[in-house]
Amino acid sequence: MALLLNSAQLRKAREAFRVLTPLFRKYRTRILLGFLGLLGVDLLQLLIPRVIKSAVDSLQYAEATGAGLFRHGALIVAFAAGIAVCRFVWRYLILGFSRMLERDLRNRLLSKLVTLDRPFFNRRPAGEIMALASNDLTAVQMACGIGLVSFVDAVMMTAAAIMFMAYIDPRLTLLALAPMPILALLTGLLTALLHKRFSRVQEQFSRLTEFSRSTLGAIRLIKAYNQEARQTGYFDKMGREYVNNNLRLAVVQGALFPFSTMIANFSLLLVVYFGGRLTIAGTITIGDFVAFMSYLFLMTWPMMAIGWVTTLFQRGITSLDRINRVLVEEPVIREPSAPLPMPDSNQLLTLRDLTFGHLPASPPVLNGINLEIKPGFTGIVGKTGAGKTTLCQLLARIYPVGDHQYFWGDTDVNRLSLGEVRSRIAYVPQDTLLFSDTIGANICFSRPEADQGEIEKAARLAAIHDEISSLDKGYQTRVGERGVLLSGGQRQRIALARALLTDRPVIIIDDGLSAVDTDTEHRIIANFRKWLPGRTCVMVSHRVAPILEADEIVVLANGAIAARGTHQELLERSRFYRTIHDHQRSNTGTGN
């Protein structure tokens, strides 16, 4: 394999191959038996020319008999049957191994992805990740299956054929191998270009996949703005670029096979000319000449397959390198080496001089936040871009925080187990996400073991039970892709029920009632008041009404706390809060 790669590619291949080493070790018995079957095929194929030589020589020297020729024919048939059995064995074992490797590598990729946190997914679009799990994994599977078999088969067959040819006539063997250095040189020159062009093809495929995903996800918006033709035009442009990149790749791939074939045929020409002369001169027998030609034919396929095998390996190495770059990623939020015991659930959540920015060079989204969140109901309000969602995500441990900035009780959150902290927090994000499944399955996603009574109890708390019950299939109603068959308010309340079902001591709701009407909102808040004792609730809202009864309301402005207090205190002290309240009261005709 090293002959097919330059030094830089070989180093990259070694690094990426470490990903596959455990899988090759896991299936080593299957691989060994498969290659023994492949060895059996090659050995039997190499014996057939010897049988043919014997038959031809007996004819040349007039020693042939009907029974003797029958024995030769029967032996060839027996070898052919053995080849068929051995070929089935290696195909079943080796190609089956490649599929198992693909499965295990896909599982490992997904297992890694679910451990990574938000900063990674901010950098890597979903389309690129989907391409890794489809196109790139297929390329690795092909390289480790038929590619690896073809390479090993070519090496074994070539080495054995050369030995048999050298046994017949060393000089003729050297003539047959004379064009090989030219093939090695051309292969080396073309493979470097092949690697570069295949990388571009895979990157463009990732962009195409991401564009398709985002277009389908926003199809209703595209139709609403009559942008179908524009999106189609963009997709066509990207598709043409993808085709052009593939055609440029095909130029290199197409050059490898013809060059290999031409050199193989040139070797055949040399053998026919010089071998024929040796046969006429009596240096070798006609049987030797026929056997030599048979061995050369056995070598011809490996010579012609070098280009194809090189393509498979280049694709596999490039794709494996792309997959490996994800597998070596580490989450920004890491588990402490020796986590401390979790404090009591009703402890304070304390932020001390918390400053956070999404990128090191960008201005901080939150700056110098000092806040104590006590058990009870805490509301957060502020303009768009004030940092409310970022604050919720930090509290839910979705983004990392610096040491000594976020405490549960008196314990730095970075000294606590990440899983333990998250297991005590129910989080309702601003963007409501429902799976294309039943309503019941969406609610119990947070607690798959929950029974129907618990699911309905959570739905009642979220004031959605009656609406679900009025549907023909009730909780077995399918909601469509991302909940498209439901209204915005229904989606929000199902997401809220999902969080409430966990019955965790801390719940964070990031503007989770924005699409709910006023009457329903009042019912939810009333239910909350009954459910809340002994728990901590943090609720972000653009409207004042849902947080009027909060024990404390925090006003955020420009990433900092502008004011805090009860509703009545803020009306007296915060001009910003009073403006929001008066504006919303004048629009609704209600308020305190």
Image (cartoon, rainbow, N blue to C red):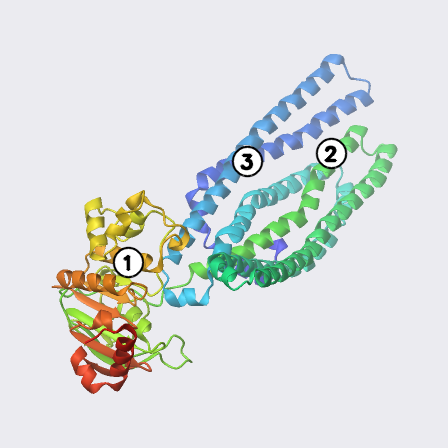
Q: How much space separates mark 3 and mark 1, taking CA atoms?
A: 54 Å
* Neighbour tally class for label 3: few under 14, some 14-19, many 20 plus, Cα within 10 Å: some
Find residue 543 and name its label.
none
Residue occupying image coordinates x 72% and y 13%: 67
Residue 310 percent location from the top left of the image: 63, 51
Q: How many marks?
A: 3
> Which numbered disc, 3 or 2, marks the residue that appears first in the sequence?
3
Identify the element where label 2 is drawn. Answer: helix
Identify the element where label 3 is drawn. Answer: helix
Residue type at numbered disc 2? Ser
Q: Identify the residue under disc 1.
A: 493
Q: Is residue 563 above or below residue 533?
A: below
Residue type at numbered disc 3? Arg
Q: Identify the residue under disc 3.
A: 91
Circle nearer the viewer, 3 or 2: 3
> Which numbered disc, 2 or 1, marks the residue that appears first in the sequence?
2
> Which numbered disc, 3 or 1, marks the residue that appears first in the sequence?
3
Q: Identify the residue under disc 2.
A: 294
Residue 6 percent location from the top left of the image: 61, 60
Identify the element where label 1 is drawn. Answer: helix
Between 413 and 38, the one nearer to me in the picture: 413
**In the image, is 142 to the left or to the right of 49?**
left
Residue 166 percent location from the top left of the image: 72, 39
Circle nearer the viewer, 2 or 1: 1
Residue type at numbered disc 1? Arg
* Neighbour tally class for label 1: few under 14, some 14-19, many 20 plus, Cα within 10 Å: many
User: Which of the 4 image quarters holds residue 565?
Assistant: bottom left
Q: Is residue 304 above or below residue 392?
A: above
